[in-house]
Amino acid sequence: MPAITVKNIPDDLYNQLKLAAEQHRRSVNSELIACLEKVLIPHKLTAREHIAGAKRIRERFDNFTVTQEELNKAKSMDRA
């Protein structure tokens, strides 16, 4: 398995990485690999996950309504 050396890591970034490693009960090396995997390896959502996410978003706006008058006013504001 390949190995790399990361040089010149800013102190505050290293401290955040070390704290995250402690919180996840991992070594700093394992935490760095987990962070890289999260950023670099795309996670493909299933259709079910997409639908569940859309439902959660819609639920946040259940009590939010816009009248036709408000829509017309907003549209005309940009045209003046």
Image (cartoon, grey):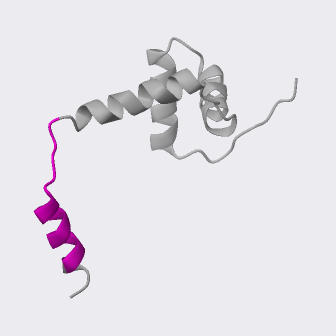
Q: Residue furthest top?
A: 25
Residue 72 part of the magenta-drawn span: yes
Tell which of 40 and 52 is nearer to you: 52
Q: Count of labels shown?
A: 0
Q: Position of residue 76 (x, y in %)?
A: 20, 78
Residue at 59% in and 28% down? 45
Q: Is residue 11 left or right of residue 72?
A: right
Find residue 21 and report its horizontal and vertical position in percent: 52, 21
Residue at 68% over, 38% down: 40
The image quarter in which residue 44 lies? top right
Q: Residue furthest front?
A: 68
Quarter holding residue 79: bottom left
- Residue 60 horizontal side relative to residue 41, left or right: left
- In percent of width and height, residue 4 lies at 79, 35
In this rendering, the answer to whether 76 lies above or below 58 is below
What is the quadrant of residue 42 in the picture? top right
**Between 62 and 33, the one nearer to me in the picture:** 62
56 horizontally vs 17: left or right: left
For the magenta stretch, what is the residue range? 63-76
Name the residue located 11 percent from the left edge and 64 percent from the top edge.
Answer: 69
- Residue 25 versus residue 8 in the image, above or below: above
Residue 18 visible in the displayed image: no
Residue 71 vs 38, above or below: the answer is below
Q: Nearer the viewer, residue 70 or 61?
A: 70
The image quadrant where one finds the C terminus is bottom left
Q: Visible in this render: residue 28?
A: yes
Identity of the residue drawn at 25% across and 80% down: 78
User: Which quadrant would the N terminus be assigned to in this image?
Assistant: top right
Examine the residues drawn in magenta and state their main secondary structure: helix
